[in-house]
Image (tube, rainbow, N blue to C red):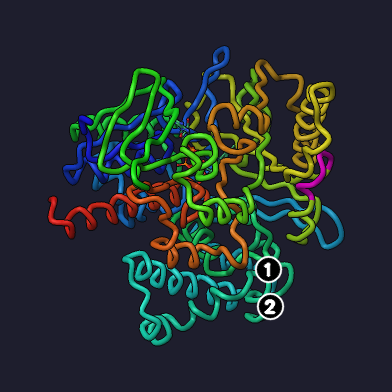
Amino acid sequence: MNKKYDVIVVGAGNAGLAFACTATKNGLKTLVIERNILPGGCATSFVRGRFEYESSLHELANVGTEENPGSVRQLFESYKAKVNWVNEENAFRVIADGENGYDATMPAGVEAFADKMEELVSGSRESVIALFDLAKKAEAAIAYLSQGKADPMVMMSEHADFMRMASHSVDECLNALGMPEKAQNIVKTYWPYLGASTDKLDLAHYLIMMARYIAGSPAMPLMKSHELSLALDDVIRRNGGEIFYNTEVKEIITENGKAIGVRIDEGEIYADCVVANCFPETAFSKMMDSKAVPQKALRLANARKKGELFFTVYLGLNRSAQELGIKDYSVFLFNSPDSLQQYRSMDSFDESFVIVNCLNTVIPTASEEGTCTLFLTTMLSESAWAGVNEENYKEIKNRIAKRMIELYEEKLNLSVKPYIEEIVIATPSTFARYLNTPNGTPYGYEVQPWDTMMARIMNANNEQFVENLYFVGAHGDRADGYSSAYSNGNSTAGKILREVKNSGKA
Ligand SMILES: Cc1cc2nc3c(=O)[nH]c(=O)nc-3n(C[C@H](O)[C@H](O)[C@H](O)COP(=O)(O)OP(=O)(O)OC[C@H]3O[C@@H](n4cnc5c(N)ncnc54)[C@H](O)[C@@H]3O)c2cc1C
């Protein structure tokens, strides 16, 4: 056996790329192997006609500004990865239908957000500020836990508020804070970004995500998310790492219960460890000798609930955003102000919520002059797709896309359909083909009351079922999202580097 690498990374999604950047920066001889011809997984773009579409990114959390950088900007800077960040001044616009419905445009920035909420819901300011204070406490606790420390005495004495909120749902905590109902509903607008219902999702996780968007200003790269992935590809190569594109890992090879390398069409490649950016259950069931996979690994993978399924419509329009009267970058269209009804709407093709983004409102050069692109997203549960088969697939796909476009036109009082020059629809099957995730979910495992971010971080060591095999990605401890994937990739590299150092091999 001829070992060539310290580490082989299976997949160049956000987490795989961040892992490889930290690993190569710290001297690990690293090979990244990616099925697609491009880096990024979700984080990419594609071209149809004269339009280049952002494939997934609505907005990135925790980028911050040049003066006040967030952890994502700092991570990219630490890699010397060059990215042209663009901040969005509004957090979101939300239109909720039904009784007590509302139409609210919420600015980024804690003070501005709280002021606007007070304007919309008198008497809400104090509880909104209290919420952002709790978010800081949750960040501090997660930073402590992420160092691999979990001393119960320290947690109880220094992170008591976090311990309290980590065992309660978003709904329970917002009620306990005495926040008026309408303000609660507006505050919960971001729940689709975690894909979990607010009666089950723990407040700490939700707050960290929400505050990273609102306090840290939502951001995106000037040249779409492909700019991020290319910048990370460049870092890996500059640091001496290698990347094979258009190459699928067919097998993770094990010997005596340890991962020792991978098999691709051209042969076997060996390494000290394998880091999989693919789903654990895909690795366990399709890429490994079943005898090498412990039963408890399979049981845990099966017990977890797979994340929601995406359905996206990308439109290239032959008018500018200005000509069409499109002003908002990001609009959430819900069928109800109640977040549980919004969550349940994912069971129905005809009711699911829709998020619409127009990149040109923030980056006018996102498409040719006189044109613009729209990116419409909905999420649907696995059960919504249960009755879909080869016969009705096309009809259902067109029906969902039509409803999404018409809902946007109706709620925003705009006309879009006559100006469609290009239309691309991505269903869960499209995502499954591109990402190689179960049913195409880009969201890993949905967080559950027994499977929270905190539980995952604290149990990380117990979940390494096969020696020298690590998993990074949306299915990891930080759950879904760009910033979570970068953080998960980076912290896993830190963990391996510590292990290498402790083993005396460094
Ligand atoms: C439409 C959409 C909108 C989204 N909007 C946002 C947003 O606004 N903000 C946000 O933060 N997040 C958003 N997300 C979620 C976010 O993109 C994902 O959670 C995150 O990027 C997942 O990263 P990952 O590292 O798990 O890798 P993935 O993106 O899942 O990539 C995994 C990579 O591994 C490769 N791979 C798998 N198996 C193999 C194999 N056997 N051999 C070689 N390569 C393999 C795949 O080809 C893929 O490139 C969105 C996702 C989608 C789809």
Front-most of 302 and 288? 288
Which image quadrant for residue 16? top left
Badge 1 is on which residue? 184
The residue under the point 84% across, 40% down is 350
Rendered position, 449 above or below 296: below
Looking at numbered disc 2 in the image, what kind of residue is underneath it?
A: Asn
Q: Separation of disc 2 and disc 1 at Cα?
A: 8 Å
Badge 2 is on which residue? 175
Q: Residue 352 location in percent, x, y?
A: 77, 44
Task: Confirm whether the magenta stretch covers residue 157.
Answer: no
Q: Nearer the viewer, mark 2 or mark 1?
A: 2
Contact check, label 2 and label 1, Cβ < 8 Å: yes
The residue under the point 53% across, 53% down is 295
In what quadrant of the picture does the N terminus appear? top left
Looking at numbered disc 1 in the image, what kind of residue is underneath it?
A: Gln
Q: Which numbered disc covers residue 400?
A: none
On screen, residue 248 versus residue 126, left or right, reads: left
Secondary structure of residue under mark 1: helix
Front-most of 253 and 355? 253
Asked if residue 63 can be seen in this view, the reply is: no
Which image quadrant for residue 373? top right
Q: Residue 172 location in percent, x, y?
A: 67, 76
Q: Residue 241 location in percent, x, y?
A: 23, 32
The residue under the point 81% across, 39% down is 349
Magenta span of residues: 345-350
Find out if the beta carbon at label 2 lies less than 8 Å from the nearest ligand 1 atom. Answer: no
Q: Residue 387 location in percent, x, y?
A: 83, 35
The residue under the point 47% across, 56% down is 478
